Image (cartoon, grey):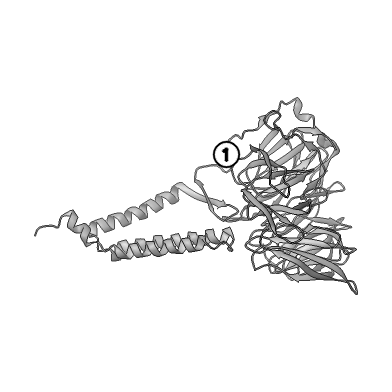
Amino acid sequence: MKQPDSNSARRTIRWWPAILVLLLATGAIVWVRAQTDWPFQKRNLTSIEILLVVAILLLLWWTFLSRAPKRLCLGITFGLVGLGVVCGALFRVTGVSGDLMPIVEFRWAKPGAVESASVTPQSESASTTLVASANSFPQFYGPDRNGVLPGPVLDTDWVGNPPKELWRRPVGAGWSGFAIVGDVCVTQEQEGPDECVVARDLATGNERWRHRDAARYSTTIAGEGPRATPTIASNRVYTFGATGILNCLDLATGQRLWSRDVVQESGGKVPQWGATCSPLLVDEWVVVHGGEAASHSLYAYRADNGEPTWQSGTSASYSTPIVATLAGVRQILAFNDGSVTGHDPATGAVLWQRAWGNGNVVCATPLVVSSNRVLFSSGYGVGAELLELSPKGEGKLAVERVWKSIRMKAKFSHLFMRDGSVFGLDDGILACVDVANGSQKWKEGRYGHGQGLLVGDLYLLMAESGELVLLRPTPEAPNELTRLKVFSSKTWNPPALAGDVLLLRNDREAVCLKLPVVRER
């Protein structure tokens, strides 16, 4: 019997199901990308899910419904399956970006292997001349825990007078930042099965001591290692690990003075993204969030001996609490899972509470706007609300919304205010809104989900891409001045600045830069 030629074989293939699937998928993706009220994360995840479903449907069509010649059909099917196996053997997903896009690299690539960045090295003799001796950055977002520093006055000419690299060291995984006091800097890292607190010499980067706990947090999406920044006070270091271990260590030696397993004691479990709250020192207490599904949100311990004192609130969040005086009342401001609250620092009693969010995680720190107003903001399509507090009687405060805006969605970077405007990363894009009504003044410059510090009138922004960007934002424009490539991989860690010394890190390496300064304030 005469075999059909290739042209007749091609004509027998049933193409219309594949064409229909592709047309429907194209329409679905176009519709998803057009949903501008959806956060980037939701649009990206939905688009990826559509593509995965399309790939499966096309493979099923080709294998069982295409009517292609059997040999051709099986050859292509097994070829595609083999290609998938080869790709799985060659590549791995090492995490996701802040917009939840997969980050793929070769399986043999070492996590600590990074490219040299375009920073000018400093000579060994010059590396010890630091302005930082008279400054400190003792906790998350600096001395006042708000990411705002008065100075020094930075030189903006990074072409003629660039930052100098004092040292660069490989570090263990984690999204922790540095705390700096005097000539020592402290951060948290993951080393194999151990969660570590590491103290280094500020001038050289040489390790002084390393404290270990047998604990490890790691997921593909969230990454590996601790994520909270240490807090230094009275020659003690307070750290909060990703699995919920709260340590008090001696600053000079790293010796453990006391320790609590907060997640276990709270009756909850390790949060999906790990415990992220940087310890808050207030009066004689150290305050952190409890575990996921815990009976309370905030847990306070005596700073001197770790003895439990009070618990308050419901359902912990990923945000770091702060202390502020609003409506004449000193209080701890905190995000919870589903609400925002103010607490009495002495007892934890709830002074006021307001519903918050859409069920997604909340991370950003509250922004105090005036003596009786505070701004809360979250990503994942939530936006921002300006709240006004007033005395209510019986030790309580009344809270009212001044405005709500979708134009400022801070995922986990801090916001700052100047010249009657609020500035920050709105879902990864730098934006400015009017503090009076929440209306958007401008939005431009995709820097990803990075972290920054306001230094005088300049904004030092560590972009998610690993670039250090210097801006002078005003209500009229972002005014980017210069930028410098520091890292070659994802950077979510908050920067630390003491004097002219800037400490930066990600989950692979740490860098100490000496910034050019015009004059000190």
Can residue 413 be seen by looking at this rendering?
no
- The image quarter in which residue 466 lies: top right
Nearer-the-camera pick, 230 or 135: 135
Q: What amino acid is found at the position of numbered circle 1 in the picture? A: Ala
The quarter of the image holding the N terminus is bottom left
The C terminus, quarter of image: top right
As displayed, is residue 359 above or below residue 465?
A: below
* Side of 309 relative to 438 (left or right): right
Camera-side residue of 45 and 301: 45
Q: Is residue 321 left or right of residue 167?
A: right
Q: Residue 421 placed where, x, y %?
A: 75, 54
Q: Residue at x 50, y 50 (%)?
A: 92
Query: Disc 1 marks which residue?
Result: 113
Vertically, is 103 above or below 45? Answer: above
Q: Nearer the viewer, residue 517 or 272?
A: 517
Disc 1 residue crowd, few under 14, some 14–19, many 20+, Cα 10 Å: few
Q: What residue do we see at 50% from left, 63% from top?
A: 32
Quadrant of res 127 = top right
* x and y, in percent, of residue 158 in the image: 69, 32
Is residue 511 toward the left or the right of residue 518 in the image? left
Query: x, y percentage for residue 494?
Result: 71, 48
Q: Residue furthest left?
A: 1
Could you tell me which residue is drawn at 73 percent across and 47 percent down?
474
Helix, strand or loop status at disc 1: loop
In the rendered image, is residue 355 in sight?
A: yes
Q: Position of residue 225 (x, y in %)?
A: 65, 51
Residue at image point 86% right, 66% down? 344
